[in-house]
Structure formats: C-alpha cells, structure tokens
Image (spheres, coloured by chain):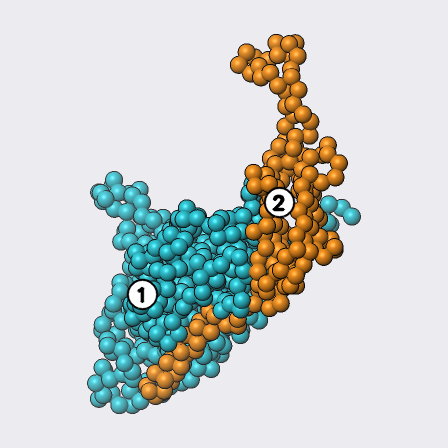
Chain colours: A orange, B cyan
C-alpha cells in the first residue's frame, strides 16, 4: 500500500478515470468511414425461382395406374430449376456476372444473389440482364438506364416478376 | 518407421506445441503480474480490480440489466418510433433517460472489456484445465452470448450506426449457407424493414442476455461462494465512475437510419463493432475463420495434454470424520458433498460423512485445514484426520515440524507456514527459521501455530498468496479468518498475538517477505527483552490484535 492516504486516493481516482477514459474513447473513436466520400454503392440482390428445366407433361394411363389412387396427379413435372444468370454493366464495362444455382437438395429452390459493388458517384449508363431459363437463348430480362448516383447513395438492383422484372430501388 | 516410433514423434510434436503455449503464457504472466502488483499499491490486494475481474463482469451485467428494464419500458418498438423515442430520452430527459442510456452502453462496453481481461488472466495463470475445465468450457459460449447481446443493442436504436451494424451483421451471417433467403434482404430498403422485424430484434436483445444469465449460472456451478458482486468499495467506485462517464460523455444517436444511403463517418463502438470494419477490409469468410479458430482454440485448450502430473485428491477417513461439514463449507470448488455416514447405524443416527468428487477436487488441502481432527495435540502416535491430502498428510507435517524445530538454534526461532503458489520460502530458511510450504495456506490447521509455539518456536509467520490472488480462491481468506478467530476451526485466543504474524505475498515477492520476517524477529527480540510489556501491543491494525500485514 502507498504510505500516504491522500496519495492512495489520488492514485485510485486517476486509475478509475483512466478506465473511464478508455471506455469513453473507444466507444466512439476513431471514427469509421465505410465508403469513400466520392463513392456510391450498388447492391445486386434478388431471390428468384428459375424456370423448371423441363416442361410439365401429362402422365400416361399406365403411369397413373402405377401410382396410389391419392397421388394420381395428371401432370408429371420435373422439380429441378434453371440456374439464374445475372450480368451488370456500367458505362459499357462488365462489373458483375454471376450464375446463381437453385437451392435445395433437389435444386428446386430459389436462386439468390447478394453483391455489393462500390462505384464512383456521378452519371452512369447502367445495363442489367437476367436469364432464368436454361432453354431460352440470350437473356430473358434486360433493363438499361442512364442514372446519376449521388455520393453515398445505395442503388438496389432487384428482381420482381410481378413488377416487370428487373427493378431499381 | 514403426507405429511406435511415429507415435513417439507425434507425442514430441504435441509437447512442443504445449511448450510453446506455456512459454508464451509464462512471458505474458510475468508482464501481467507486474501490472497487477502495481495496482496493489494504491488499491491494496483486497480491492485491486484486477483480482475481481469476474465479479466486476457480474456488476456490469447487473447494471446493464437494470438500466435495460427502464429503456425497454420507454422504447417505442415501431420502426418509425424507435429512433424518436430514444432520441427524446437522450435530449428531453437527459437527466434520467439519457444517463440511463449512457450507463447501459458504457456498462456493456466495460462488461466486454472485463470479460476478455478475466479470460486472459485465467489463461495466463493456467486456470483452464483439470478441475477448472468445467468453468473454462462453460465460459466460452458466454463470449458469444455477450457479443450477440451487445451488437443487437446497436440495431435497436435504429440510427445510422445501428443501420451500419445491422447490414454488416446480416452480410456476415449470409456467408454461412444456412439461410434460404439472405438476411440482407431485410435491410435492402426502408420498405423492407417492418415492425415485426423490430419485434424480432428486441426478442434477440432480451432473449440472448437471458441465455447469458443461464450460462453464467452454469459457469459458477463448480465455484463455491462465487463472487457475483465485487467488494462494496470497489462496486461503489466503479458505479460512480460509470455515472461520471455517462454525465461527461452522454451517448447520442447518429442520425436516423436511411437505407437509401451509406452512413458517413461513424462514431463506432470498437468494443463490439470491430468485426464489421475487419470484414470489409478482408472478407466475411476470413472473419468467420478467425472467430471459429479462436473459439476452437479456447475449447480445445483444456484438453491439451499437460506436463504437470495430476496431484492426488483429498481422501476421507470415515473413522475420523464426524460429519461436521466444515470441509463442505470451506471447499472453494464445491468438490465435497455430505452423505450418510456408514457408521450412522452404530449408535450415531443422522451422522454424515464427507465425500470428495474426484473431478472437482483441486487438491488444495483447504479441507484438511478445516477439519477439527487435524489438531496436532491429539495424543496418537500417527495423526489421522477426517480428510487429508495423500501428498502432505497432517501427520507428516506434524513430524516435520517437530524435527525442524528441534534443529533450529537462536533466541528467535521462527516457523514460517507458506504455500507453493505464493512467495517461495526457500530464501527464508536458516539456522533460526524453518519453512513449511503447504499446497495452499488454507491447508494449515490453526492449532499447528499453537503447537509450534509450545514446541519451542518464538514466533510463527503465516504467508501465502495475496487476497484475491489465491491460487485456490479462498485459501488465504479462510486462513486469515481462522487465525483471527472469525471462522472455525479458530486459533485459540490464548495464543499470544505478538507471536503470530500474517503477511500475504505472491510469488516473486520473496525479498518483501524476508524483510517482514526480519522485522518480526526484531519485534520478538524486543518483547523477549522487555517482558513487562502488555501482550496485546501489536504492530498493526487488525481488530483482534493479531499481527497482520499485506505486503
């Protein structure tokens, strides 16, 4: 123990203050900037079921007869779905391409994509293409637009078939 | 090469790894002990925060829980209202809600700091294997619970910091191939964030801390008299420090969340959110690899082979155990249970017998020190006690004491009882000093002091690990209480107080304990030369008059 009581109190006070200083400092400092001031963020994100690999076909009477009575669905549909391919071009330059495989053990689930793309803010020509059918040639959906990205802006490229396909949020 | 040769090489490799860990641990321990001992100067060992890190963790947790009740009561849990309600609390009700909010955050920060320091201290002291394995292993998941609880709190505020953390956490979690729909889609736009999502986040922020409490309960299961509150003075000073910090540097929100833009410069809480920047400068996979490797290391550590041979555990002698329960009360690790005595049917109905749980026994010998049968005055050729340590039975201690005392010379012959984990007694021994290093100072039956004095010692010096630093948690505390007559078995009041000195000293403080010994000898010589002095005059501040010092 320190000999002087006042010195002891002072030392204790300083050490408690040091603890408070450490907690207070690193709870808010140093400041963190996630994105450079002149950058914008493009997020490519969708969850979409690709088309089935094969079309449904009617079952033959022989096939129906082999099935239990309660399972005699007239149409035979293959479960596996097509992978979904997406491409994004910015100012004529390919910045992203991804083939999203269908999820699930039987590959019958949705294909999902999430990708962050940090881009310079400013005016750009954006082109997005999406293909969700293995049987089709070329892309099934496309959207092209000229847009201005503000610094720090988040542009979301999504897909919603009910809203016409590729959407920009 | 034969299988046997290959196995030998594997064993050598394993021990090389262990040696490397031990070398690093010992170097770290040397540095750590300098810090801890440095804090003993202003705080004293009993109030040294480094010696109460676990208890301080509990204190901060209680503080978080208490302040959390108030915040939950006033929080508007809708997406639209949550930011507004917290902001109102911060600015309009700064004197209560604002302080409580700041306390909640700073206590959470302090909680993670003392938790990590507590883990580091236990690692450096090698307290993770053997009988401590259970406490170590049950502590590892608590780190995860603490992290999840803390990070979840930032989301609830739903300011720009919360937005950043929520998105970053979702991106990190999405790296795992377990979600059918990416979690990040919940934060794509303002329209995606609904009240139901916020209800889920609140559930996480309350549910995981409940798991934390449950885990803490497991964590201290093998600890007898677990310290869930630090000493009062330390608690009050810590609380006052948190209040002062909350008033001096109030926590404020950083603008409402706006998912259409990336937050600008953020006042990041680095205690909890450090993983987010780490992920963005590396990758989600590498951060997962880092935390998985750290968790795996912590979980594997107690199972690594050790060079140290396991010490024999305490043994109960039913013929000498009267079921008094003192060992049951004093065992620091709840390794003793009381069972019906096999001789209870022979005229002693209801008598109990101590039974040692082998996996929980620390081999500290505190039970032997607590046993009333351990008195050396018993008139038996071979002293057998109710519970004893095979590696150092009380009978062997009595014999060694008699032999060494007989060999001492000089007017101030001193017997020193110390422990294997505190200051070494080797440098103290000489022609007039006999040292006995016990497994733990708590192993010393108090009657051995009176016995040593009757057998010719001029004085007895008792030492061992400093308070809060006892290798077996409660050894020095129980010893002191027994010697001061506050705990059974107690030292008889008829023992002259000037002939007993208690001085706690950790390993490395041999010079200090030597100086104390010399001072003690000089004092005894003075008493011997001035027999007219009253016996109760002692050299320090203990209420019972026992001479007592904390080096």
Q: Is residue B20 above or below residue B219?
A: below
| Disc 2 packing (10 Å; few <14; some 14–19; many ≥20) | some
Residue A142 appears in the figure: yes
Which residue is depicted at the point 54% across and 48% down?
A: B185
Q: How far apart are marks 1 and 2 (CA)?
A: 46 Å
Q: Which type of secondary structure does the marked residue at label 1 adopt?
A: helix
Residue beneath disc 1: B97
Badge nearest the viewer, 1 or 2 = 2
Q: Where is residue B315 in the image (x, y as percent from the top left)?
A: 40, 52
Q: Which type of secondary structure does the marked residue at label 2 adopt?
A: strand
Task: Say which mark, if any, is on residue B192.
Answer: none
Quadrant housing residue A12: bottom left
Question: On the picture, is B160 further left or further right than A146?
Answer: left
Q: Which of B4 and B287 is in front in this view?
A: B287
Q: Which of B352 and B75 is in front in this view?
A: B75
Q: Position of residue A39 (x, y in %)?
A: 62, 64
């Amino acid at each position: 123990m320190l000999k002087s009581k006042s010195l002891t109190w002072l030392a204790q006070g300083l050490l408690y203050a040091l603890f408070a200083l450490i907690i207070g400092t690193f709870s808010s400092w140093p400041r963190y900037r996630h994105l450079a001031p002149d950058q914008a963020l493009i997020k490519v994100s969708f969850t979409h079921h690709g088309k089935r690999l094969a079309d449904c076909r009617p079952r033959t009477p022989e096939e129906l007869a082999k099935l239990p009575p309660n399972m005699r669905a007239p149409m035979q549909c293959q479960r596996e779905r097509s992978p979904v391919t997406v491409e994004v071009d910015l100012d004529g330059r390919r910045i992203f391409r991804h083939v999203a495989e269908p999820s699930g053990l039987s590959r019958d689930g949705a294909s999902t994509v999430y990708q962050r793309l940090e881009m310079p803010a400013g005016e750009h020509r954006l082109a997005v293409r999406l293909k969700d059918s293995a049987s089709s040639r070329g892309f099934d959906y496309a959207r092209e637009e000229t847009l201005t990205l503000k610094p720090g802006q988040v542009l979301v490229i999504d897909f919603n078939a009910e809203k016409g396909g590729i959407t920009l949020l | 090469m034969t299988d046997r040769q290959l196995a030998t090489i594997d064993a050598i490799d394993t021990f090389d790894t262990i040696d490397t860990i031990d070398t690093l641990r010992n170097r770290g321990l040397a540095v750590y002990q300098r810090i801890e001992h440095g804090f003993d100067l202003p705080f004293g060992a009993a109030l040294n925060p480094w010696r109460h890190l676990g208890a301080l963790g509990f204190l901060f947790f209680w503080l978080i829980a208490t302040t959390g009740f108030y915040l939950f009561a006033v929080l508007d849990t809708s997406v639209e209202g949550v930011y507004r309600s917290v902001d109102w609390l911060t600015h309009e009700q700064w004197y209560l809600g604002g302080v409580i909010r700041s306390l909640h955050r700073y206590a959470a920060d302090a909680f993670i700091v003392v938790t990590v320091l507590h883990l580091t201290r236990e690692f450096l002291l090698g307290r993770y294997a053997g009988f401590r394995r259970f406490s170590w292993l049950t502590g590892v998941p608590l780190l995860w619970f603490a992290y999840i609880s803390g990070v979840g709190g930032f989301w609830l505020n739903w300011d720009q910091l919360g937005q950043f953390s929520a998105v970053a956490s979702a991106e990190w979690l999405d790296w795992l191939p377990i979600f059918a729909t990416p979690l990040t889609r919940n934060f794509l736009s303002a329209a995606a964030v609904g009240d139901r999502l916020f209800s889920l986040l609140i559930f996480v922020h309350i549910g995981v801390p409940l798991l934390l409490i449950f885990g803490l309960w497991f964590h201290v299961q093998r600890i007898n008299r677990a310290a869930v509150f630090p000493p009062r003075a330390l608690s009050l000073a810590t609380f006052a420090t948190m209040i002062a910090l909350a008033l001096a540097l109030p926590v404020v929100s950083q603008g409402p969340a706006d998912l259409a833009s990336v937050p600008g410069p953020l006042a990041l809480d680095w205690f909890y959110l450090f993983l987010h920047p780490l992920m963005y400068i590396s990758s989600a996979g590498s951060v997962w690899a880092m935390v998985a490797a750290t968790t795996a290391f912590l979980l594997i550590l107690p199972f690594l082979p050790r060079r140290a041979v396991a010490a024999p555990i305490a043994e109960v002698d039913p013929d000498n155990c009267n079921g008094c329960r003192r060992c049951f009360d004093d065992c620091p690790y709840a390794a003793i249970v009381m069972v019906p005595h096999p001789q209870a049917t022979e005229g002693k109905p209801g008598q109990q017998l101590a039974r040692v749980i082998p996996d929980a026994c620390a081999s500290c010998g505190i039970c032997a020190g607590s046993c009333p049968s351990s008195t050396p005055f018993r008139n038996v050729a071979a002293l057998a006690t109710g519970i004893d340590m095979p590696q150092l039975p009380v009978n062997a201690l009595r014999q060694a004491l008699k032999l060494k005392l007989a060999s001492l010379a000089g007017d101030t012959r001193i017997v020193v009882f110390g422990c294997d984990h505190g200051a070494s007694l080797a440098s103290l021994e000489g022609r007039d000093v006999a040292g006995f290093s016990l497994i733990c100072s708590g192993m010393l039956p108090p009657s051995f002091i009176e016995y040593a004095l009757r057998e010719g010692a001029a004085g007895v010096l008792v030492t061992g690990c400093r308070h809060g630093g006892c290798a077996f948690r409660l050894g020095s505390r129980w010893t002191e209480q027994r010697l001061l007559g506050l705990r059974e078995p107690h030292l008889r009041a008829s023992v002259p107080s000037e002939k007993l000195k208690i001085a706690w000293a950790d390993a490395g403080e041999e010079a200090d304990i030597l100086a104390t010994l010399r001072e003690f000898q000089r004092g005894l010589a003075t008493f011997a030369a001035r027999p007219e002095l009253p016996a109760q005059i002692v050299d320090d501040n203990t209420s019972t008059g026992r001479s007592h010092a904390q080096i």
